[in-house]
Amino acid sequence: MTTDRLFFGLGAIFAGVAVALGAFGTHGLRGMLSPEDLATFETGVRYQMYHAVGLMALAWASTRWDAPLLTAAGWSMAAGIVIFSGSLYTLVLTGQRWLGAVTPVGGAAFLLGWVLLAWTAFRK
């Protein structure tokens, strides 16, 4: 599978899951969670959607620039979604507050993905 199709497909899947989780948070969790926990859940959804769209932009970029760093950027963004957003969802749904310590690792993965994408754009 080509890089553009892989990351566009992953971005579309992550975006669809973000929509479903956003609806679940709004309709299924409202009234069950504290306002703070609901806001935390929504932060996970929002960052998942941002980075799903980022993956699709990266897929487009890979059709223009052949750079191994784009693949690293894509996997970094995908890992960031799983670690950052996933830790927030799990923290809220299980009450395991220690997961808050894992969340910054996902944030660092997001940052790395964007830096690698920018580096590729400016280098070419």
Image (tube, rainbow, N blue to C red):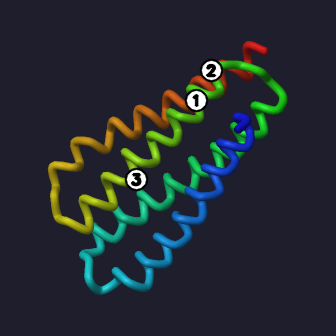
Residue 85 placed where, x, y %? 40, 53
Q: Tell me if 62 is positioned left or right of 50 in this view.
A: right
Which percent across, then down, holds residue 122? 73, 18
Residue at the image point whose x is 72% and y is 42% from the top: 57
> For residue 85, which numbered disc appears in the image?
3
Residue at 79% across, 15% down: 124
Q: Which mark is residue 73?
A: 1
**What's the CA distance linking mark 2 and mark 1?**
6 Å
Amino acid type at image mark 2 = Leu
Callout 2 environment at 10 Å: few (<14), some (14 to 19), or many (20+)? Answer: some
- Outermost residue toward the right in this view: 64
Determine which of the numbered discs, if any, sits on residue 54 in the image.
none
Mark 2–mark 1 contact, CB under 8 Å? yes
Q: Is residue 16 left or right of residue 26?
A: right
Asked whether the beta carbons under mark 3 and mark 2 sit within 8 Å of each other, the answer is no
Q: Report helix, strand or loop for mark 2.
A: helix
Q: Looking at the image, is mark 3 or mark 2 earlier in the sequence?
A: 2
Describe residue 90's horizontal placement relative to residue 115 as left or right: left
Mark 3 to mark 1 CA distance (whole Å): 17 Å
Q: Secondary structure at mark 3?
A: helix
The amino acid beneath tag 3 is: Ser
Q: Nearer the viewer, residue 74 or 101?
A: 74
Image height of 92 relative to 81, above or below: below
Q: Which residue, given by chain and number where applicable, does mark 2 sit on? A: 69
Which of disc 1 and disc 3 is earlier in sequence?
1
